Amino acid sequence: MNVKKYLGQAYYLNQKIISNKRRLEELKEMANSADIAELSGIRVKTSRKADKTGDLVAKIVDFEAETASKIRDCRDMLDTIEKQIDSLDDAKLKTLLMKRYMFFCTWGEIAVDMETLNNKKPYSEKQITRLHAQALEEFEKKFGNVLECL
């Protein structure tokens, strides 16, 4: 796996966590609305299944456990990536990789933020992409053996 793809996992792992949490909230909302319909005596078209709410609650409990496990796995991977980036020696390259792969900033946002950190002169997006290539090289030098195992 190449460095860019490896670091890019952070975005997709984060999206997966958000998606799972959203789905869980939807299931809980469905369970609450089903409970309200049953409690209020509203007659709704139902199937022959006796306990729809119970089935939905069981589904939620299963999904919650599955989601918690996936979230732990995603968080572990994100923590690993963050620690690897943080272990780089050059603060500028470390900051650039963190902003790009952990905070999902655009090149323009990174250029503005790096300008603030630099206090000398503003960075252009071209300079940022050049620094990015340098940062990826540094990361690969340090963790290339780990990436080969993936």
Image: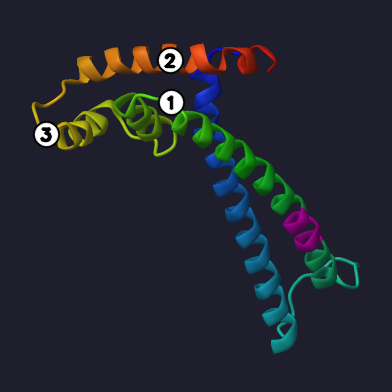
Identify the mark nearer the N-term, 3 or 1: 1
Quadrant for the N terminus, please.
top right
Residue 68, compared with residue 51, is above or below; it is above
Badge 3 crowding class, 10 Å Cα cut-off, few under 14, some 14 to 19, many 20 or more, is few
Tell me residue 34's x, y (percent).
71, 74
Q: Position of residue 64 (x, y in %)?
A: 73, 58
Say which amino acid is labelled 3: Asn
Q: Is residue 101 visible?
A: yes
Q: Which residues are magenta?
A: 59-65
Question: Badge 1 is on which residue?
Answer: 88
Residue 133 appears left or right of 32: left
Task: Tell me the CA gap for discs 3 and 1.
Answer: 22 Å
Quadrant for residue 43, please give it.
bottom right
Contact check, label 1 and label 2, Cβ < 8 Å:
yes
Q: Name the secondary structure under disc 3.
A: loop
**Kind of element beneath mark 1:** loop
- Is residue 28 left or right of 112 when viewed as pictured? right
Inspect the image, locate mark 2, and give the three-letter code of the amino acid beneath it: Glu
Q: Earlier in the sequence, mark 2 or mark 3?
A: 3
Q: CA separation, marks 2 and 3?
A: 24 Å
Rendering quarter of residue 125: top left
Q: CA distance from mark 1 to mark 2?
A: 8 Å
* Residue closest to the far front: 89
Residue 138, disc: 2
Question: Do we see residue 41 in this rendering?
Answer: no
Q: Which residue is mark 3?
A: 119
Q: Residue at x 67, y 47 (%)?
A: 72
> Magenta-highlighted stretch: main secondary structure?
helix
Is 108 situated left or right of 86 in this image?
left
